[in-house]
Amino acid sequence: MTAITDAIASSPAAGVIRARPGGFARDLAAIAGRALRAVPRDPTAVLPPVFIALFFFVVNIATLKKLTGSHPGFSYAAFEVATAILLGVTGVSRAPALVLDVQTGYLDRLLLTPVRRTAILLGHMAADVAVAALLTVPILVLGIILGVRFPGGPLGAVVFVLLASLWSLAFAGFGYAVALKTGNPAAVNSMFLLFFPFLFLTSSYVPRSQLSGWLSTVAGFNPVTYLLGGLRSLVLGSGWQWGQLGQAVAAIAAVGLVSMTLCFAALRGRVKASSAV
Amino acid sequence: MSSVITRPGVPAPGNAGERRGPQGPAGDAIRAEALVRQFGGVRAVDGVDLAIPAGEIYGFLGPNGAGKSTMVRMLCTLLAPTGGRALVAGYDVAAQPGQVRLRIGVALQEAALDPKQTGTELLRLQGRLYGLSSRELTRRLADLGELIELGDALDRPVGTYSGGMKRRLDLAAALVHNPEIVFLDEPTTGLDPASRARVWSEIRRLNQQLGMTIFLTTQYLEEADELAHRVGIIDRGRIVAVGTPAELKRSVGSDVIVARVDGDAAAARAAVAAVAAVPGVSGVEAHGGELVIAASDGAAAISPVAVALAGSALTVRDLTLRTPTLDDVFLELTGSHIEPANHAEDPS
């Protein structure tokens, strides 16, 4: 151990290295890089949602394909791929890892550095978007094998993945809010409960027109209904349906506005003891 | 005893003169004025004044719950003061926390590490957040690799490290950006004696060769005695004494005679009065089953003290003559012994 000061003291450049603000982009990239490196080390955080999505995709098609087969030109696989994608990416985030950082004190170590406080959160979120985009790939591949096509071409597929990833981010904001507010892993895990009303009180398995009265009413207030509509317009329509895409973006923005407001407020609360954000 | 012992001259620092904040060459590296931190109705830190010159190792001594860690968290910008103000490296911790963070390194009480990252990844990330270039990082990692002596373990996840290895990695993370001021919050708690000695040696070298100002909190009296140029004793959120270890010990007396006794309170009071009347005895205090007797010349005073005790109603179990320790200082100031929390020794 004692060799260190000898090494530093004897270095001709000793004293030259000094800390300096790294810049927002560099801070964000550093935090996102750490979050991404952690993903393959913790496969249980991403593999089960993909498995569940693939499982229900296949099972639901097998269950309901005949029932919907009487509608000419209607592909239930294309209808269902949007639901499968949302099952795969909703709730996937590094929020549990952030809780661990709170518990181990590593968040304090980050807060002791000159890193921008917002970069800590945005770095995790940038990693989440990348992971969500990656998770859509196996589901989309299976969909294409089952006959799903994008009338808008490759760009349609890109928009599809982008919408799903942004939705994942909007939903993840709730997890980060709870993680930062409570520092409690059980509380973060309980955010899974939000998943059910969002994903099931909507047109997940049949078109909204086929839902019973009360469920159709509730689905009308569920932003996921409009997100599903936008996603489905990319695989079921004959071209770009800007109205439905606009509604999907608005739905993501509305949920994102609420969740991001909550999580950035929680971040401010977490660091308010510190003198600057 | 007066509440604060006058500050003595500070031992010559290493090359501290190279690193100065805007306070100038004569300024203090750390300065606190009537610093307060209140949690609800509890004042964890209650009007603390500090003046720590650049290049000093300042030992901050106190029992669990005395306010040491709260003080550190305020000085390193993790916790906002609720009163008073503090300057670190010449910058206000509340108004200019970013400037403070660039100039300090901190190893908190619990090694704050990410168990999923490797040691190398953790140090690289730490360096990037301090704005170091890849080239600078490579150089620092080579230096710090020698510090922490982790060898190939640096490429293993931190979760596989022993407690001692984590402590050393935590120290390296605190030093990766070559800070001017280092806060070490109980850096040797939980370490085995060999690891503790290595950390002590490193703290000395960081101070002597690199001129780093070191704010060291500890529950271990021998650690403060061994390392600190000056020691501040905190009790219930207030600084009760400041001075060099030698000065603090002298304030108790040149020698200390400790009598372990049995008997009731009335007998103890009578014995205290009898011993206090012995020539050469400068103070007597009863604490539990002990009488702590300060004497200018212990060897000369021990016989008359023994005679005085023999004439009292107390039963003397043993009588010990020794030089004062910081524990005696602590006992005199606070009325209780400092009792470090028990942590399992963790060989590294």
Image (cartoon, coloured by chain):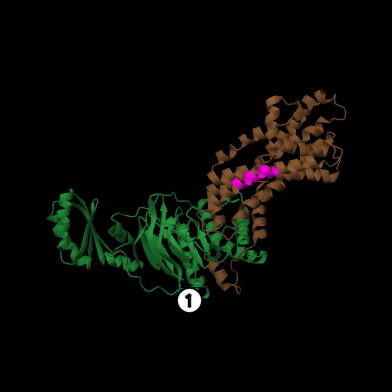
Chain colours: A brown, B green
Q: Nearest the camera: A23 or A36?
A: A23
Q: Nearest the camera: A149 or A51?
A: A149
| Number of numbered discs | 1
The amino acid at mark 1 is Pro
Residue drawn at x 67%, y 30% is: A218
Specify whether residue B87 is painted magenta. no
Quarter that holds the N terminus of chain B: bottom left
The answer to which quarter of the image holds residue B300 is bottom left
Residue drawn at x 80%, y 23% is: A67
- Local crowd at mark 1 within 10 Å, few (<14), some, or many (≥20)? some
Is residue B182 found left or right of B330 in the rendered image?
A: right
Q: Visible in this render: residue A200?
A: no
Is residue B72 found left or right of B261 in the rendered image?
A: right
Question: Where residue A140 appears, x then y in whole percent?
Answer: 79, 39
The subunit letter for the residue under badge 1 reads B
Residue A92 vs B45, above or below: the answer is above
Q: Visible in this render: residue B87?
A: yes
Question: Where residue A254 appears, x then y in whole percent?
Answer: 67, 43
The answer to which quarter of the image holds residue B239 is bottom left
Furthest residue toward left: B311
Q: Nearest the camera: A107 or A225?
A: A225
Question: Where residue B231 appears, x then y in whole percent?
Answer: 38, 64
Q: Nearest the camera: B183 or B36?
A: B36
Is residue B161 found left or right of A197 in the rendered image?
A: left
Specify whether residue A257 is painted magenta. yes
Q: Please, what is the dominant secondary structure of the magenta stretch?
A: helix
Q: Give the range drawn in magenta.
A: A252-262
Residue B346 vs A150, above or below: the answer is below
Question: Where residue B178 appears, x then y in whole percent?
Answer: 56, 66
Give the residue at mark 1: B25
